[in-house]
Image (spheres, grey):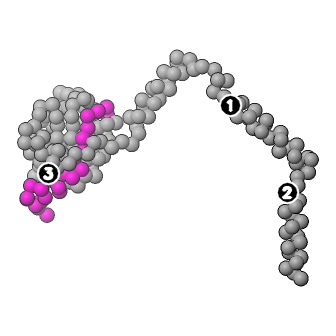
Amino acid sequence: MLRNALARSARTVSRATLAPSPARLSAVISRPALLSVRLNSSDAAAKPPKTPEQLAKKAALEARDNLQRDWDAKILSYEELLPKTQSPSPNAYLIDVREPDEVIQGMIPSAVNLPLSVLPAALNLSSVEFKEKYGFDKPKKDQEVTFYCRSGMRSSTASDVAKRNGYTNILNYKGSWLEWTEKQGSKPSA
């Protein structure tokens, strides 16, 4: 008996929804017209054109955002770095960003030491001040600069710091000192 009552009520509900009333029918017919009016109201042609000042401001903001965006430098492998250490170029820098007490373990040939802790301030020095303080010429903004550290974390940070300071040709040897010593056959001292 309960089964019959449920079946009857289900049939009644489905018939009521299948046969729309005249009011419901007119609402369904008028909706597409409202929808097209709504879609056309946000048409881009309705917006006034941007002035040259607005376009310049937008371009400046996009350029600033590009500098501040998180970014990863091209990652070098051991095989790509090896030739750079065997015949270094005066137009390319290999920078070890480890602290001086870590550099005692050794350095990759042709590298110079510029600790990550002083890198942001160092990149803002004049060329003369930089050379006096660190003993080598300050890299130019478009010169190739490769960073490495002990395990690859600080070199990634150094790449980001350099990019935010306007350097454009940045490489990251993520294998860093640990991979270098492993591939060269000598182990770092503990």
Circle 1 residues within 10 Å: few <14, some 14–19, many ≥20: few
Dot 3: element: helix
Residue underneath mark 2: 18
Amino acid carrying label 1: it is Ser
Q: Residue at x 51, y 21 (%)?
A: 55
Which disc, if any, is residue 74?
none
The residues tagged by marks 1 and 3 sit, at their Cα atoms, a distance apart of 61 Å
Q: Quarter of the image containing the N terminus?
A: bottom right
Dot 2 or dot 1: first in sequence order is 2
In the picture, measured across the screen, residue 16 lies left or right of residue 133, that is: right
Amino acid carrying label 3: it is Val
Dot 3 or dot 2: first in sequence order is 2
The residue stretch that appears in magenta: 165-190
Dot 2: element: helix
Which image quarter: residue 62?
Answer: top left
Q: Give the percent coordinates (x, y) of residue 88.
A: 10, 37
Residue underneath mark 1: 42
- Residue 90 painted magenta: no
In the picture, measured across the screen, residue 86 lies left or right of residue 44, that is: left
